[in-house]
Amino acid sequence: MAACAGPAIRRSPVVVAQGAGVLDIGRQLQQLGLVRHPEVFRFYVLSRGETGRLRAGEYALEGSMSLEQIVDKLVRGDVVRHVVTFPEGTNLEDMARLAAVKGIPVEAFLAAARNPELIKDLDPDARDLEGYLFPDTYDIPRGRRAGGAARGAHGAALPRGDGAGAGPAARAATRCARS
């Protein structure tokens, strides 16, 4: 089924909220000029059997994309990545400033980085994550719950790295950040 996207050609950031319904997503895409009719978007997603497969996250979509391309991207979870590199010798405050450039509020980053609960199994006496966030390149999704690391009321940002080239503690801290 070939369906046309909206008339816009510009690149639009789209944030699909966790638990958003297909029609809600369609309305959001219509407001941005990416689809003409939210009901057509909904019908297309239903006809493909993808209703429960659209993933939450921040996406970069272009008005020149077909409806099929938009849905494919949402199903794949092809989200925008905000990558930051923390050089060797960077302390938590400097890391927070570097993360802020990628849209993570300094206060939110520091709140998560000062939460020792995330490494309690590695170091029960730790007061924060200082020393566990190694020089590396981290993927920091934009949003209130960036990184998905801070639990409960924190809702703060925590760097997520791939752990490549890092020691066991760094890989363990990365696993904690991803849970």
Image (cartoon, rainbow, N blue to C red):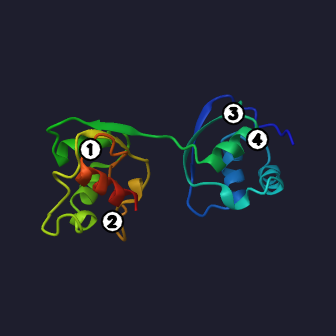
**Numbered disc 2: secondary structure:** loop
Mark whose residue sits in front, 2 or 4: 4
Q: Which mark is residue 166?
A: 1
Residue, x 51% and y 40% (percent of image)?
80
Q: Going from the N terminus, do you reach mark 4 or mark 3 first?
A: 3
Report the amino acid beneath label 2: His
**Residue 106 placement, left or right of 128:** right
What is the CA distance from the residue labelled 2 to the residue labelled 3? 36 Å
The picture places residue 167, in percent across and down from the top left corner, at 24, 47
Residue, x 77% and y 51% (percent of image)?
38
What is the CA distance from the residue labelled 2 to the residue labelled 1? 27 Å
**Numbered disc 4: secondary structure:** helix
The picture places residue 62, in percent across and down from the top left corner, at 65, 33
Mark whose residue sits in front, 4 or 3: 4
The picture places residue 97, in percent across and down from the top left corner, at 24, 41
Question: Disc 4 designates what residue?
Answer: 68
Mark whose residue sits in front, 2 or 1: 1
Question: Disc 3 designates what residue?
Answer: 63
Q: Going from the N terminus, do you reach mark 1 or mark 4 first?
A: 4
**Residue 171 placement, left or right of 93:** right
The quarter of the rendered structure image containing the C terminus is bottom left
Q: How many marks?
A: 4
Report the amino acid beneath label 3: Gly
Residue, x 37% and y 71% (percent of image)?
152
Q: Going from the N terminus, do you reach mark 2 or mark 1 first?
A: 2
**Residue 146 placement, left or right of 98:** right
Viewer-proximal residue among 126 and 16: 126
Q: Can you see residue 108? A: no
Report the amino acid beneath label 1: Ala
Question: Disc 2 designates what residue?
Answer: 154
